[in-house]
Amino acid sequence: MKRGETKSIADLVREMCREEGLETPLNEYRLIQAWSQVLGPAVQSYTKELNIHNQVLYVKVTSSVLRHELFMNRKSLVHRLNNHVKAQVITDIIFR
């Protein structure tokens, strides 16, 4: 970095995370944490497990009715969750 070139601390931390390979795990963690914020406490109460593997979010839901409703809206949910994290973290959701 040249002397006259200034960067914010947030940009420097983001750049360091990207160089160290920490950006993807950090975004995955943020997306899982965003689940209850995006979908609300009612859905969160029926959610038991959230895992991300190969850009697919696996969600264990205890209500079959809610599972079907979420399944029908999964493309919208993918878009909303990725927008909340401001990164392309997942491409699909599988409800179990």
Image: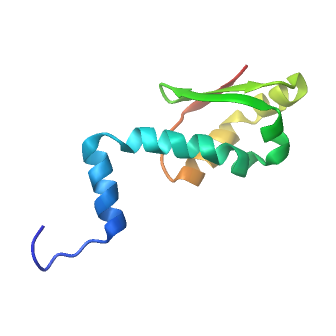
Tell how many labels.
0
Residue 71 vertical placement versus 24 (above, below) = above
Q: Is residue 2 above or below residue 94?
A: below
Which residue is outermost to the right? 65
Q: Position of residue 57 (x, y in %)?
A: 60, 30
Q: Position of residue 29 (x, y in %)?
A: 52, 41
Q: Is residue 22 left or right of residue 90?
A: left
Q: Is residue 24 left or right of 31 when viewed as pictured?
A: left
Residue in the picture at 68% in, 41% down = 77
The residue lying furthest to the bottom in this view is: 4
Screen quadrant of the N terminus? bottom left
- Extreme-top residue of the structure: 96
Please indicate whether residue 86 sits to the left or right of residue 62 in the image: left
- Relative height, residue 21 to residue 50 (above, below): below
x, y percent for residue 76: 69, 42
At horizontal 57% and vertical 52% (from top left) the residue drawn is 83
Location of residue 73 (image quadrant)? top right
Visible in this render: residue 88?
Answer: no
Residue 81 visible to an observer of this rendering: yes
* Residue in front for this viewpoint, 61 or 81: 61
Direction from residue 51 to residue 14 in the image, left or right: left
Q: Nearer the viewer, residue 57 or 26?
A: 26
* Quarter in which the C terminus is drawn: top right
The colour mode here is rainbow
Picture residue at 9% right of the left edge, 72% below the top? 2
Q: Residue at x 76, y 32 (%)?
A: 47
